[in-house]
Image (cartoon, rainbow, N blue to C red):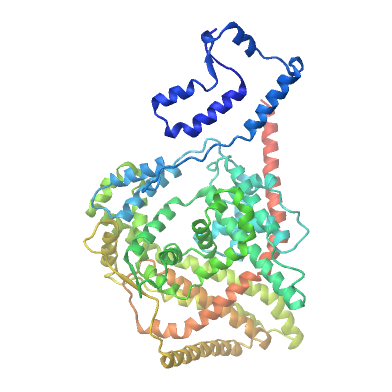
Amino acid sequence: MQGIIYLDKNRKIVGRDQENSESNNLNESEKEEHSSDSGVYKANELSKEDENQMVWKPGFLQPKEKLEEEADKLSEYKNFTKPPVQTKPSFVEEVSIEDNKIQEDINNMPSNFSEPFKKYLVDFKHSVKEENKRSSNPIYVDEIASKVAKVYETVRRIIDWKEEHLIRRAAIERVLKRRFVSKVYGISIIPDVKPVEAAEPFILELIRSGYFPNGKIDKDKISDIQNCLEKYLYILNNAVVINDEEAKTKKEQKAGVKKKINFYNWVIEIAACEIEEILDAPLREYALMNLMTDSLLQRIKIIPENEISEEDKYIQTYISVHRTLYNLDKPITIFHLLKYKYPEFFTSSEYLPEFTSKIFDVWNEIEDYLNYKKGSEFFRVAEKYDAAYLLIGDSMNSMEKEVEIIEKKVSDTGVFIQAVENKYNERLATLKKRLSRLAIFSTLSIFVAGLASLLLFEIPIASWVRGYFSPWSIVADLAIPTALMFILVWMIKPPSGNNLETVKEEVLKVVYKVDELDIYEVRLKKKIKKFLNFIFAIIYLTGGMVSLYGIYWVFKIADVPWTSLYINTGNVAMVVFSAMVIRQRSRELTIVEKENIIEFILDFFSIPLAKIGGWISAKWKEYNIVSVFFIALVDFPFSSFVAMIESWRNFIKEKRSELN
């Protein structure tokens, strides 16, 4: 009888535990000596009597004394605890195999690359490989149902308009709000979502609507989305937003309800960001954002020194990169701040109850970072130099087909700078077209809101108060905001002639090693000139009042009833705000500012008005009744209709296959 036989199960357990606890302190000879008493024997070393003892017998054939003895032993082994392992002191943090591989790749980069760019290049190559991976078990949707859904989504974008790079996440957010509508808005006509049932239809709807490619998302993602939905549903169900005992007055109850809606919207916005990352993470964009953050951190000098911590310096730089490089909005910035501050929330389900219990403290902490008073100083630096990083990303994307030899191509300064110049000219050629598209959709969104206001409120109220609503008033109501947007966009001018050379110089400083880094001063304590600031504030308010009165006067001439004057003035303020945002986007390639007297005068009158428009836009988002109406009464039936079309198509395909 050959092989290894265990004398009894218990002795094997003790021997194995002893080996594990002592293995770090044993040499080879000690290990052999230890293993000889570990409860393991070879068959040819056993006597006949020993073999008989090893034969298993059921419990009812064993003597009572034997059973009691074994029970005592098992009790001892159950309470056995391993001694604490004594770790050796280490002056170097333990590095994983993956980290070692990354560091090896960085070390093998050409020596003329800067350190931040070496890290970026590793991340870029990784992202290209990940994006080119083919799904082994992809999700497909019916093409006919997809076409129907896309038509609806085109109309829906106008009502709830977002910028091009935010449209997909806005769609995810909208689907989430529809599925969580009973939680967010207190509408009980739609049942609560069940993640195990909702995950797959959720993904299918997003693919049908054209926000994700058909046949690219793997079915394994369904379980990931299910876990994600369960996580955020847990927060919505367990976070205590309103304490009914504390809210005694109607005012306090109203404030509590508002806080509840704002909190639920906040959670759903974060959930939408995570879902988008699960389904299609923008790895290239993340890599470029990290490059810009690392490069700026090397150059930013805080004055006075030690005014803020290194962590706060990093966070404010990171926030400014979000706001400038890709014009990312508040939810995605919050999502990335949470990943930085609370990584356990995204990696461990065990941490979820603890995170939920302190989520309002987390909310306030993140808001404090976003509303930091001196954050504009970091934004000013990032806004000035973001063009260089944007063109680095474009140039790297143009070389993705040769990713295996991309280091060699980039190390040739002439080749890479030529690629940067080509991408600069491409962006410049399409800039006006992209801005016009931005202006059209923005104006259409405001136009639809104005039309809804006109039909639902302005005309009925004016007819009741004045007895009529003149046709010229309707024309002025709709045409003035649209014409104003067209004029403001038309006035946008391209960058100056010497801007390209400045951009190329900045790219060289970022990509390649330089003898001395530039310094970007961020002054967090400036001398306050109270009297001068007071004079400037008076002039600023005067410009705002003149703008408001001018708009009021134009509508007054058009015989717009007084009941509509305030609504129309608010619409114009939102148009001006949108125009200022578009104007900001037009500077995506600009490092060298080209100011003129017309822009100076325009800023004097438009910035105060844009501030008002921004405030109204934020409130409109908070109380967007039209959007809530579509979510509850249009989105849900239409999505069900599209799903029914796909089910019918699948049924027909099955019947067709039966013919063969």
Left or right placement of residue 610 versus residue 517 in this view: right
Q: Where is residue 563 in the image (x, y as percent from the top left)?
A: 68, 86
As rendered, which of 169 and 636 lies closer to the eye?
Answer: 169
Residue beneath the point at 38% across and 49% down? 124
Residue beneath the point at 50% across and 83% down? 608
Q: Where is residue 123 in the image (x, y as percent from the top left)?
A: 39, 49
Residue 49, picture quadrant: top right
| Vertical comparison of 222 with 605: above or below | above
Residue beneath the point at 35% across and 60% down? 389
- How many numbered marks are there? 0
As rendered, which of 26 and 178 lies closer to the eye?
Answer: 26
Q: Position of residue 527 (x, y in %)?
A: 38, 85
Residue 573, picture quadrant: bottom right
As rendered, which of 555 and 167 lies closer to the eye?
Answer: 167
| Vertical comparison of 386 with 147: above or below | below
Q: Quadrant of the C terminus?
A: top right
Q: Quadrant of the N terminus?
A: top right
Left or right placement of residue 341 versus residue 528 in this view: right
Left or right placement of residue 129 versus residue 242 in this view: left
| Vertical comparison of 612 with 432: above or below | below
Is any part of residue 311 visible from this angle?
yes
Is any part of residue 208 visible from this angle?
no
Q: Where is residue 489 in the image (x, y as percent from the top left)?
A: 45, 74
As rendered, which of 61 and 5 lies closer to the eye?
Answer: 61
